[in-house]
Structures are given as structure tokens and as C-alpha cells.
Amino acid sequence: MFRRAQPALAIGAVGLALSLAACGSGSGTGSAGGSSSGGKVKVGLITKTDTNPYFVKMKQGAEQAATSANAELSTAAGKFDGDNAGQITALENMVASGVKGVLITPNDSKAIVPAIAKARAKGVLVIALDTPPEPQSSVDALFATDNVKAGELIGAYAKAAMGGKPVKIATMDLAPGVSVGVQRHDGFVKGFGIDAADPSIVCSQDTGGDQAKGQTAMETCLQKAPDINLVYAINEPAALGAYTAVKAKGRENDVMIVAIDGGCTGVRAVKDGKIAATSQQYPLKMAADGVKAIAEYAKTGKKAAGYTDTGVQLITDEPQSGAESEDTGFGLENCWG
Amino acid sequence: MTTSTPLAVRADGPAALRRLLTSPAAGPLAALVLASVFFSTATDQFLSGGNFSLILQQVMVVGILAIGQTLIILTAGIDLSCGAVMAFGGILIAKLAVSGPLPPLLAIALGILACAGFGLLNGVLVRVVPLPPFIVTLGMLNVAFALTHIYSEEQTVTDLPGPLTVLGRTFPLGRTDVTYGSLVTIALFLGFAYALSSTAWGRHLYALGNSAESARLSGIRVSRLTVGVYTIAGLVYGIAALLLVSRTGVGDPQAGQTDNLDSITAVVLGGTSLFGGRGTVLGTLVGVLIVGVFRNGLQLMGVSSVYQTLVTGVLVILAVTVDQLSRKGNR
């Protein structure tokens, strides 16, 4: 007898699902229902994932800018860091929905390029945020942090803070072949005034930017070289993982940790003295500038082009001469997450 | 022996209608139609040939994986390795063709055969050793994932030769552009629907899923059948790998990481029972289209993608509820 009830149950299921969907269109987006958008410029934002606070902040920036530019924002994300197929699908659906432009943070710099080319061929302005595609010319414009500079700032800071003491450096890196990680690492090395093969770099480990993996990586490094006294971390989660490992050895007062990103948790860690300094980047600004550029394109037909540096700022409560910085008060006002 | 009637195309008139209504795919089909009607009224762009073609392109890779997954679930098994095996096949095809360099067709053949090899290995471990399918394919997921990353050296393979991307290209059908890959997808679904509903192999598969022991006692060569099903599933994943490479235009070592769960989602949404012996491959097509239609429709409405995940989750739980209730009803 229950078999006959199946279609009815299914209909109930769809009804419920659709009402959930209707709730969704009411919140978080500019207007409810595509058909009632009436003349508003449609803008798409595709981030790497939905869950990382960095991209949550990026979405916020896009929403604010969309409201003030009277644009309709639609957002999507990959399911996991590295999900290229999900981003392609989202991009296609946005183009089908008639967006004027799309802001995208590529999960895979190379693999997204053919899909971007298809979107641009249909007259859609495509701007990369945060991460450049390869080649960079495959998008109209790039709004991003200068990651080399972000590395240089903390490299120079660490150099000044160490004041000529002999250093043993551990680097908590991202992952092989990911440009952001490579650029930050190289920037740090350059800012510190050494070359990449310098013997003072005694341990380099990949962390994926993850706190637990950062802890494991640092534990391994301390095993290998117990006298490490300077840690460079790709981001603050990796830095905090490293801090946990350092603290477990009772060495939190004689190991300096520097990081990059400027997330709120990270800045608070700087305030608490767990991290000495961090380079803060501005995802909200990237997205806001991106939405403005698309609104401008819709109005005047003028396309944004080339690279726009969205800025990076050294944040520390123990400033060093020769390394210009802001304190954690400033950092907390401008942090994300 | 089977409690359900597979959705058969050959039946006529009212009988066919009754069969459709009582098939496990009836509920999902109603859900698909309703969702489509909703999105047609909610957005201007949903109801168009171009958009339907787009949805088909977007679901074809998971759809083909879900065919293999359906076969395995019908035997009361499960395959967690399908996405990883496909990713390996895709990287193999792309890399052999680009830096091998082998003739593209040979690279494609080797890639598909490698996937079939993974399937064969799964089947042997499941039936001959024997080990639980969940564990075997969980292990194989890791093996295939690791081999993909080792072989690719974490690098995306670009600049693919033409023959590798043919299935991603379009041809005009009326006023709509359809990809060749979509045709392959539909052909595979129809082919397996026929094989399941109208051949001895199909009947044996349902029998095996209902009870391996009674299947064995009624003279079905259970071991050969099981190993065969896993191998065929692997072969099908290889075809999915080719479609993936064609659609994205690259060989991507990160591909397919959630596709194992997505394929199981499609199978469940399509009314196939996770306990084996009950379900259809056309139901799976409906299931995969439900996911595709929701994703596309919600995006056209400008709704954030987390809501698509939410809706999918609710639908899956309801689909399993329906399966359980209908089982109770049959007892």
C-alpha cells in the first residue's frame, strides 16, 4: 500500500525543497526571483569554497557593493578547494542567467581557462579575484593582493626583529605548485635578504594552510631541527598550528612566528603575542572593486583591464624600525573572518 | 523474485502507464517534473533548449558514473572509488596523449582500460577474497587518488589534442547546440536500461541483489556475474573520464573528489534501493537530472549554492524514507 503513496510523498518533498529554495532567494541575494530583476545589472561571484571565512568576507564585500550599485548579485562556490568542475558549472549557469560580468577566484589556475574563454566569448566581463589564472591574460582583469610583497613585508620585519642574531628558519608552506604559496615563500625569503637555498632555512613543510597540518608539520620540523627560532607561515591557521607545536616544547618565548593573511583570528593571535606579525590582505575590497567594475562596464561599456593591487599591510604590536606597520587595533578593524 | 518491475519501454498502453506509476522511479520523476515547472515559472531563462542542453552537459559526467554505481548498488554493493578511478583515467588519457605522446585514440583506449582494470580488481576483492564492498572501494579510492597525484605530479595537463575534446564540442539540433558527449550519455543510459530490463544478464543481476544465496542455488554463476559487474562499472567510469576531459578541456588531478557521493546521491534520488535488487538505471537518470535542475534553476534565480546543497540533502533523506516505507508496505 505504501508504494502507491510514493508520488504523493515525492510531491511533498519537492514542495518542501522549493519552499527552502524560495527562502534562499529572499536572503543573501539582491532580489527574489530572476524574472523580477527589472533592469538591474546581474553580477556573479564564484569563490573557491563556501566555508572559508576569507571567501565569506569576499561575498560580503560583493553584496555591499551590489546594493549600492543597484546590481543583482548571484554567488556560487566550489565544493572543496581545488574543485574545478563545480566552478565551471556555476560559471555556465551564471552566463545562462544573463550576467554582465563574473568575479572568480579560480580553484585551478589552468583548468578554469577554457570555461572562462567561453564566457568571455559571450560578452561577459570576467575578473579574477585573489588568484590569477594562468595565463593571466585569460581574464579581463585581476584584482588581488601582491603576494610577493606580502611575503617581503614579514621577511623584512623578521630580519629587523632578529637584529642580526643567527637564525634557523622553518617555513610552513602551502602545497606544491600553487602559485600563492610559492610567491609568499619567495617574498619572505627575499624580504629577509637571503636566497632560497640559504642554509639558515632548516626545514620546509607543506601545510595546505590548515591548522592541524601546520601543527604536525612544525612538530616534524622541531624533531629535525630543535633549535629553530623563526617560523614563516603561509597563513595564520598554519602559524597557529606551528605555535601549538612550539608551545608543547616550551619554546613559545624564543621562537618568533610570522604569517600572512590578516584574518580576525590571526590578528587576535598577533595581539596575544602568539604571532609576531602578519601581512593583512583585503578580500572585501577585491570583491567590492570587482562589482563596481562590472557595474561600470554595464553602464559605459568600458572594461576593466590588467592587474589592480588591492593592497597589503603589515600588522604588529611590536614595530621595528625600517618596517612600516599598523597595530592590531587597525588590524582588527579591517580584518576578515 | 524481484519485488519491483523495472521501467520497461516495450510494454503497451495502460499497462506501461501502470508500470511507470508503480515503478520506483515514479516519485522521482514527479519530483523532476514539478521542479522543472517551478523553475520555468520562476525564471525567464530556465525553459529553453539551450538551458536543457546545458543541464545535460553538466550532469553527464556524474550521470555516467552513476550508471556504474547503479549496477553495483543493484548487487547490494557500493562503490566509493568511482570518482577517484575516473580522475585517474582522465589524467592517464590526457597525459599519455600530451606528453606520451601516444596517438590520442590509443591514449583514450588505455585510459578506459585502466579504469576497467580498477573495476576488475574491485570485483575480485569483493567476490573472490571476499571483502565488504565498502572497504574494498574505500581502499581503492585512496589508491586511485594517490596514483593520480603521483602520475600527474600535481600538474594540470593542458593543450589537449583535438580528438580528446571532441565529445565536449557541440552540433546544432534545431535551434539548440548539443554536445556529442550528451548523446553518448543518453545512449549509455538507454543501453543499460535495455540490458537490465530485457536480458538474462539483467534478471540475474536483480536476483543476485535480492539474495546472493538463492541466486547461486538457481544456477546463476554469482562470482562471474559480480566480478563482471564491477569490471563493466570500471569501464563505464573510463567513458566518464573521457567525457570529463572533453568537457573541461584539461586533465585535472583534483577532479572527481566528491563524485562518488554525488553518484550515490543520484542513484538514491532515482529510487534505487541501497539494499540491492530494486531500482532502474532510468531512475538514476532522473535522479541525476533532479540534482542538475536544482543547481541550474537556483543559480538562474540567483540563489547561493549552499541552498542547492541543502535541497539535495533533504531530497536524499526523503528518497530513502520512501524506499524504506515502501519496503515495509510490501511485507
Image: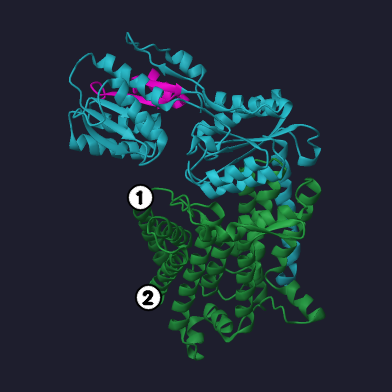
Work out whether A219 lies above or below B112.
above
Residue located beneath label 2 in the image: B130
Residue A279 on the magenta span = yes
**Chain B drawn colour:** green
What is the three-letter code of the residue carrying label 1? Glu
Q: Residue at x 32, y 8 (%)?
A: A321
Q: Which residues are magenta?
A: A252-280
Residue A247 appearing in the image: yes
Work out whether B308 lies above or below A66.
below
Q: How is the image coloured?
A: by chain
Name the side, left or right, on which A53 lies relative to B141.
Answer: right
**Chain A drawn colour:** cyan
Across and down, in percent, residue B146 comes to 36, 55
Q: Nearer the viewer, residue A271 or A179?
A: A179
Residue A203 on the magenta span = no
Task: Decide: few, some or many residues near mark 2? Use Cα within 10 Å; few <14, some 14-19, many ≥20.
Answer: few
Determine the CA span between mark 2 and mark 1.
34 Å
Q: Give SS at disc 2.
A: loop
- The disc numbered 1 marks a residue on which chain? B
Quadrant containing the C terminus of chain B in the rendered view: bottom right
Q: Quadrant of residue A21?
A: top right
The numbered dot on residue B153 is: 1
Q: Residue at x 72, y 29 (%)?
A: A298
Q: Quadrant of residue A60?
A: top right
- The disc numbered 2 marks a residue on which chain? B
Residue B261 appearing in the image: no
